[in-house]
């Protein structure tokens, strides 16, 4: 004889929300440039960037019903930060024989070459920052996320986020200054 | 409690600015976005730009006929017409036997009277009747057929048939 299916009488079954995939798609497309920059500046290797972006997208689709309307950007940034942390961890555990962070750009106009060198210098500085300072600095200075949003994303009080930003700026300025002085001492362009 | 100015908007040095601006100008390759959307099942199928020519961007039916072309549409129409004509002729042919038999009888008879068909002795209908001797051995039920039973009585002088008729008693 078939036993009746047990139903918890106390906890009612939550109504399954239908995710608005069109809204998720819009949010992903709108946030993609910033998300890509965030993943890059958070240290995801160039060879893993494609996979990291796809992981963010897949996670967003899978958890679409959990995204609150109006908080799509925060949700995506949170996912991107976790994906970046995992990618960095994988990269640290299994260093590959990949080429350096950015492949040889070949012949570039002077302006583009200068931008390329500047990004390499910035990435070297960010690599030396702690993760907490790096997240705060990248989100605030490059992606223009507000401090309250950063505090929510990183799950710290606003004062802590403000303090991290201040320390990250000090670190950044000190590193830029040190790089400049070393370049001058070596007689080359920083 | 407003956010402090960003470095690029504040008192950053030239070197700091160049690093920050270069990072902000780092553009993502569009193919990465396309691949990610496709992997997540969010890719939108691309449509050729010349598809909606001729009228409003239409329904699937309109697109279907646009794809067919004029020649194929005419060919399809002719096939439909031929098929319809064939179906009409088939229905006519099905109805013709019951209509044709009365007219054929009416044309064969001299008058519209419905007399019972009296066939003469040399009628071809009498010919195929089986000989009673053979039919008696193989088909005992042959006598109930009205034609076979009536013929010997109607045509008593037919040679070869009298011996099979049993003589009346007395």
Image (cartoon, rainbow, N blue to C red):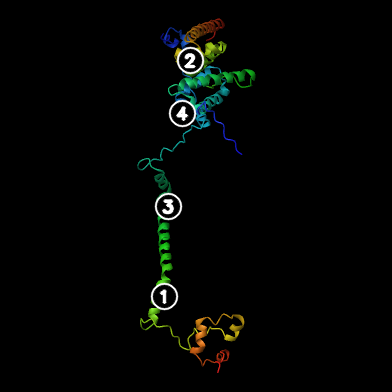
Q: Quadrant of residue B55?
A: top left
**Helix, strand or loop for disc 3:** helix
Same chain for labels 2 and 4? Say yes or no: yes
CA–CA distance in space, label 4 to label 1: 76 Å
Residue B52 percent coordinates (x, y): 39, 40
- Give the mark, 3 or 1, whose residue is nearer the N terminus: 3
In front of the other: label 4 or label 3? 4
Q: Quadrant of residue A129?
A: top right
Q: Residues within 10 Å of mark 1 (few under 14, many from 20)?
A: few
Residue A10 percent coordinates (x, y): 52, 26
**Helix, strand or loop for disc 2:** helix
Same chain for labels 2 and 3? Say yes or no: no
Left-right relation of A148 to A99: left
Q: Residues within 10 Å of mark 2 (few under 14, many from 20)?
A: some
Same chain for labels 4 and 3? Say yes or no: no
> Tag on residue A190?
none
Return the residue nearer the eye: A19 or B142: B142
Marked residue chain, label 3:
B
CA–CA distance in space, label 3 to label 1: 45 Å
In the picture of the structure, the residue carrying the numbered disc 4 is: A25
In front of the other: label 2 or label 4? 2
CA–CA distance in space, label 2 to label 1: 96 Å
| Badge 4 vs badge 1, beta-carbon distance below 8 Å | no
Q: Is residue A118 visible?
A: no
């Amino acid at each position: 004889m078939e036993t009746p299916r047990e139903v918890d009488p106390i906890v009612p079954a939550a109504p399954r929300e239908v995710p608005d995939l069109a809204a998720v798609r819009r949010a992903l497309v709108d946030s993609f440039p910033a998300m890509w920059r965030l993943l890059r500046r958070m240290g995801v290797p160039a060879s893993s960037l494609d996979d990291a972006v796809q992981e963010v997208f897949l996670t967003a689709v899978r958890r679409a019903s959990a995204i609150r309307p109006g908080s799509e950007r925060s949700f995506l940034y949170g996912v991107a930060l976790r994906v970046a942390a995992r990618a960095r961890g994988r990269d640290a555990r299994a260093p590959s024989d990949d080429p350096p962070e950015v492949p040889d750009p070949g012949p570039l106009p002077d302006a583009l070459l200068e931008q390329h060198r500047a990004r390499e210098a910035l990435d070297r500085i960010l690599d030396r920052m702690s993760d907490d300072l790096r997240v705060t600095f990248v989100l605030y200075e490059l992606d223009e996320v507000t401090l309250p949003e950063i505090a929510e994303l990183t799950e710290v009080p606003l004062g802590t986020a403000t303090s991290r930003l201040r320390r990250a700026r000090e670190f950044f300025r000190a590193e830029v200054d040190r790089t400049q002085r070393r370049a001058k001492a070596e007689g080359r362009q920083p | 409690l407003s956010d402090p100015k960003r470095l690029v908007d504040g008192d950053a040095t030239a070197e700091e600015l160049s690093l920050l601006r270069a990072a902000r100008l780092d553009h993502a390759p569009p193919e990465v976005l396309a691949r990610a959307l496709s992997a997540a099942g969010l890719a939108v199928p691309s449509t050729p730009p010349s598809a909606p020519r001729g009228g409003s961007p239409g329904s699937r039916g309109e697109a279907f006929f646009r794809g067919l072309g004029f020649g194929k549409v005419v060919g399809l129409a002719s096939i439909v017409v031929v098929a319809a004509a064939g179906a009409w002729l088939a229905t006519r042919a099905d109805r013709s036997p019951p209509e044709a038999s009365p007219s054929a009888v009416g044309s064969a008879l001299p008058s519209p009277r419905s007399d019972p068909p009296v066939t003469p002795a040399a009628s071809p209908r009498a010919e195929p009747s089986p000989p009673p001797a053979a039919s008696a051995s193989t088909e005992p039920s042959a006598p109930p057929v009205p034609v076979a039973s009536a013929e010997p009585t109607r045509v008593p002088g037919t040679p070869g048939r009298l011996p099979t008729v049993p003589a009346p008693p007395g």
